[in-house]
Image: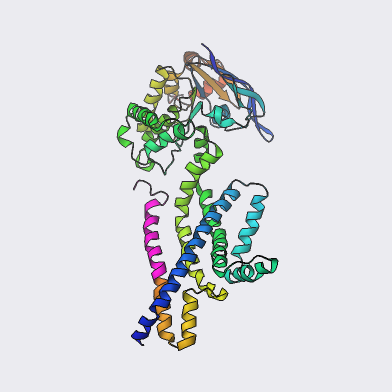
Amino acid sequence: MSDVLRIENLEKRYEDSIVLDDINITVKKGEVVVIVGPSGCGKSTLLRCLNGLEKIQEGSVVLEDQIVNPVSKNQEKVREKIGMVFQTYDLFPHMTILQNVMLAPLKVKKRNKQDVQTEALELLDRVGLLSKKDKYPRQLSGGQKQRVAIVRALIMHPEVLLLDEITAALDPEMVREVLDVVLSLAKEGRTMVIVTHEMQFAKAVADRVIFLDGGKIIEEGSSKEIFEHPKTDRLKTFLKSFTYDEQ
Amino acid sequence: MNTNVIFTYLPEYTEAFVLTIRIAWLGIAIAFGVGIISAFVLYFKIPTLSAIVKIYIELFRNTPLLVQLFFIYFGLPRIGINISAETCGIFGLGLLGGAYMAESIRSGLDTVSESQIKSASALGMTRLQIFRFVIFPQAVSVSIPALLANVIFLLKETSVFSAISLMDLMFTAKDLIGLYYNTVECLLLLVVFYCLMLLPVSIIGGYVEKKVRFGMFGV
């Protein structure tokens, strides 16, 4: 399989503190890479570096043969190929659901309105939200909004999809409906980089898991290797924090 | 009070009313244009232009319209630019209003959260597209109450036009009082005509405000 995203020697600093240190990851086509790690380890920052929303100080991020980071002038051109879904959904509150989904393909890709609408309706139907197309974001639940945000990213036909803790702001009973959508995307061979705190989900969806701590990659492997046979103490401690067995 | 007098003065007042409204709305249209452009310049911190816009806003917000009109009406001819009283009124109002509109729109722009901009740029939109489709519509809906207050304020400010001998409502009232001394009738008509000009704005404005206000989308 060919490489879609190559991250080489990436380093991110805020003034004197190093946030990400010598990160090397290669994401293959159709691969689902899940990044886990304690809060503040730099997971979300790393994800934002992958589409150029954050600048980096060293190294590079390359999508196929286009440089994403260091950020260049025509950043938008490459960014439209990288879909991103955020923790806080960030739908546009002044537009209906359908308008939210259609905005970028119409304005950025300048596609034909009829085609875009047909595709938007298909995608909304797929995530079970066709009936909500004329509603405004504030009329939807968190889980529904997040599914719309996924559709809004998908309709741009991204080469790779970045999901940044997309269930962290949801009520527990809504987590499933969102993760089901992501799982179905993984099954159809979408390339994704996912940051999550849902370990069971990470286990189910990941082809490869990366454990990040203190801005460094500590361990990397298949989900079986990472979750069942962790090598480092830091990963073992981290995984223990998710279980409630007696000590 | 003599009701007959009121009816005899109606044509004069109507004429003044039409003139006042024409100047006011042209001035307000300019004010919106100037305000939007100024807010845009401030929002994107465009070098040099930002500084000019800031000076403009402070200058026009901190001097009375009457003084501004005197400067334009009596000052410009001295450097060889002759403009009519009407043009002077329109631009005076437009520039004063522009400064207020700019501040109102800018405060609206500041309420649009950083995450909206991030999610729009993640979709590949350019800064200009983000401004036009994401930030500006949300900002305007937040600013509507302030913009509406500005419109009402500007409509009332037209009353100083009489100082540069524009035959507006105030001028007509003062003129008729000076000529015939029917003070009560003339002032009553003045109040009625100002209400006629402003009440529809308040009523329609209130309706628009309810319709498009931020957070009210989809109620």
In this rendering, the count of numbered labels is: 0
**Most foreground residue, A173 or B218:** B218
Residue numbers of the magenta segment: B196-219
Res A43 visible: no
Residue A146, image quadrant: top left
Can residue B57 be seen by looking at this rendering?
A: yes
Viewer-proximal residue, A226 or A175? A175
Q: Is residue A28 above or below residue B161?
A: above
Q: Residue at x 62, y 71 (%)?
A: B70
The picture places residue B137, in percent across and down from the top left corner, at 46, 47
Q: Position of residue B83 (x, y in %)?
A: 60, 66
Residue situated in front as seen by the camera: A139 or B192: B192
Name the image quarter holding residue B98: bottom right
* Colouring rule applied to residues: rainbow
Tell me if residue A142 comes above or below residue B25 in the rendering: above
Residue B93 picture location, percent across and down:
54, 64
**Main secondary structure found in the magenta portion:** helix
Residue extending furthest toward the left: A131
In the displayed structure, B219 sits above or below A19; it is below
The residue under the point 70% across, 66% down is B79
Magenta-span inclusion, residue B165 = no
Residue plotted at (42% across, 50% down): B214
> Could you say where residue A20 lies in the image, as x and y percent from the top left?
62, 27
Residue B201 part of the magenta-drawn span: yes
Outermost residue to the top: A1
